[in-house]
Amino acid sequence: MGFLKRLPSSPIGLLICVALGFTVGSFLPTFGGQALIFGQLYLALVNMAAVPLVVVATFFGLRQMMALPQPGKRTLMMLALATGLVVLSAFIGAIGGVVAGTGKDLSADSRQHLGILVQSAVGDAANAEVAIYEMAAPEAPKTIKPWAQLIPDNFFRTLAEGRSLGILVCAIVFGLAFAAIPRAQNPALMGMFEASYRAFELIISRVNGFIPILAFGMAAYFAANTDAHTLRSMGSFLGSFFAFAFACAATAMILVWKNTALSVAEVLSALKAPALISLTSASNMATIPDTIKAMSSKLGFSRGVVELVVPTASVFMRSGAALYFALLAVFVAHIYGQSIDGESFLLIGLGASLAAFASAGNNSLAAVGFAGIVLSMLNLPIEAALALFIAIDLICEGPRNLVTLMMVCVLIVLVSRGLPSERVDLEGIQETALGEVYRFQFSGASAVAALTCSVAAAILITIFGIGVGMKKSGAHFQLRTSEISLRTIAAYPA
């Protein structure tokens, strides 16, 4: 049982689950094709608790932020730095792709295979268009206006539809009002929110225990549905993206370590759980409870800043997506033979940033479509993104989430500067509570003597108990006899 609890936080155990999934998906493609249900069930359970957790954590974060020194300045700093980190990630991807020549030196066979994929996607789109014209005109679907994504007119409908941006904006508005109420006037509401907060954290932590099953299922599905030739042809992009993603994550880890008084091992141990969850889960909100605990209780950063930054940044701050979109644009430009000059480079960085912000609230395959923003700015075919990157997006989701997680940690470090550490030293608390520890040691003779005394005491206690019981029984018998005598005298008077 203990092994199963430790498995989700064990890198070796998760790698074994992934390897088993790839093996099963390769040799049993029918089973592997159905293994996606594990990921769908996991995401459904996580989102069930993560969405209300984001709302409640935002309430507490805003309330505690308002109690910190210079709350307005820190909030503006948080917004500016979050935007800057997303833009920085986009330009890192653009620079890395240009320097590494991502997609430039593909073999003729790889180019031909990728061209067939793109042409197939274009053909499927054309056939779909013809079929639409031949069918009766369907009823136009209801569209949501862009401003309604940020400012919804019905909070409950927004919750039911799962629109993360609208939910977060409503949470911020309500949280500001909640923070303005004096603490003495709302103890019942505080207790209710606190209980809800802990309940949602507990649900997500329990659901994250199924991450090994998720890793197995997603690996089996990927192995059963992905062509090996496609992976080889996209190897240039995958190699560059993985290298730059892990380099950004490692650099962010160093920045976090430099701003703590802890060792590298302690920082790695604190961030290991959220990092593994971000790599293996397809949800950027599954790491919220572990990230809050790691950055506040374990690493000591202000809990008010942490509880505000982590839920909001999990929706808005898409640094990993910005890096991904920039490298994607460079790769597509190179395979189409388009040179990247200064203007194209600037368009890639800005377009990838816009695409990252536009994809807020969307996960996995839904985010690939937003690559069309940056590709259209470069006059590149949008079908290339859909055809080439949907096939590999499943294995790119983890590194994207990891980059976003570590950039969120960097944002917390920068906003928390000047605030005292809030690290909880569990070992110190235990030592303070227990005080000086006394140890008792027995020799063989003293142990025999102690055992003899214990047996003698047990015998004496037993005898004493029997005596007390007999005395009480005798008294009860005498009392009962007296009652019978009195009743007899009353019945037969002299």
Image (tube, rainbow, N blue to C red):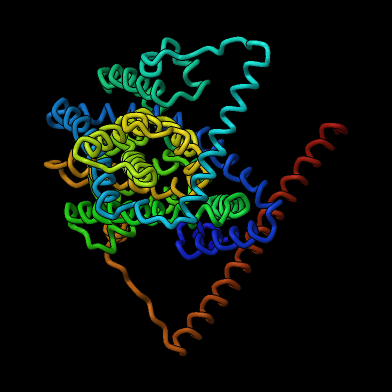
Q: Residue at x 48, y 33 (%)?
A: 366
Q: At which x and y percent is residue 85? A: 23, 39
Asked if one can make out residue 196 in the rendered structure from this viewpoint, the answer is no
Determine whether, in the image, residue 416 is placed left or right of residue 165: left
Q: Residue at x 86, y 32 (%)?
A: 491
Q: At which x and y percent is residue 117? A: 53, 43
Compared with 154, 327 (above or below) is below
Asked if one can make out residue 456 in the rendered structure from this viewpoint, the answer is yes
Considering depth in this image, is 146 or 272 the residue closer to the camera? 146
Compared with 297, 134 (above or below) is above
Compared with 104, 190 (above or below) is above
Quadrant for the N terminus in the image: bottom right
For residue 61, what is the image quadrant?
A: top left
Determine whether, in the image, residue 240 is placed left or right of residue 224: left
Q: Residue furthest right?
A: 492
Q: Residue at x 48, y 45 (%)?
A: 393
Tell me how many marks there are.
0
Q: At which x and y percent is residue 347? A: 25, 33
Compared with 219, 130 (above or below) is above
Q: Residue furthest bottom?
A: 445
Determine whether, in the image, residue 227 is placed left or right of residue 233: right
Q: At which x and y percent is residue 48? A: 52, 32
Determine whether, in the image, residue 106 is placed left or right of residue 137: left
